[in-house]
Amino acid sequence: MAGPTSFKTDIRPLFTERDIQGMIRAFNLASYEEVKAHAAAIHDRIRGIGGAVMPPPPPRGEGPWPQSRIDLFGRWIADGCPP
């Protein structure tokens, strides 16, 4: 993938409605501002650092992200978390 990443086109689509509802008490995964504020913690958890890997495996979730999604999220952080 070439060019800068963006929350709207690259990151927001990674989160399912199930992910959003599962995390809503902590923060809103559909919100650019909230995902940006928690980006480092989200990046850790999708890699299984600091707790159980997220999203959780079935039946509670769709299971861990493939490495390509984790890399994309990391690139978005490296790009400065653009909207």
Image (cartoon, grey):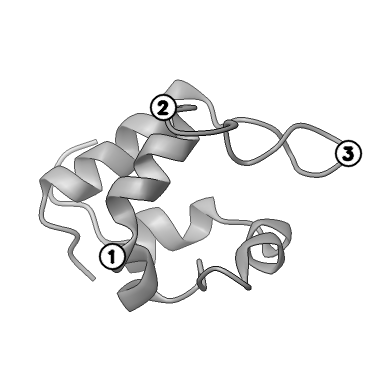
Residue 59: assigned label: 3
* In-front residue for pair 10/50: 50
Secondary structure beneath dot 2 equals helix
Which is more foreground, mark 2 or mark 3? 3
Q: Where is residue 81 in the image (x, y as percent from the top left)?
A: 19, 59
Q: How far separated are the C-alphas under marks 1 and 2?
A: 19 Å
Q: Please name the amino acid that badge 3 sits on.
A: Pro
* In-front residue for pair 80/4: 80
Q: Please name the amino acid that badge 2 sits on.
A: Ser
Q: Is residue 46 positioned above or below 11 on the image?
A: above
Q: Is residue 69 positioned above or below 24 on the image?
A: above
Mark 3 or mark 1, which has the lower sequence index? 1
Q: Where is residue 48 in the image (x, y as percent from the top left)?
A: 49, 27
Q: Please name the amino acid that badge 1 sits on.
A: Lys
Residue 68: assigned label: 2
Query: On the image, numbered disc 1 is attached to which residue?
Result: 36
Locate the N terminus and report the quarter of the image it occupies. Answer: top left
* In-front residue for pair 71/2: 71
Picture residue at 73% right of the left edge, 59% below the top: 18
Picture residue at 22% right of the left edge, 52% below the top: 5
* In-front residue for pair 58/82: 58
Secondary structure beneath dot 1 equals helix
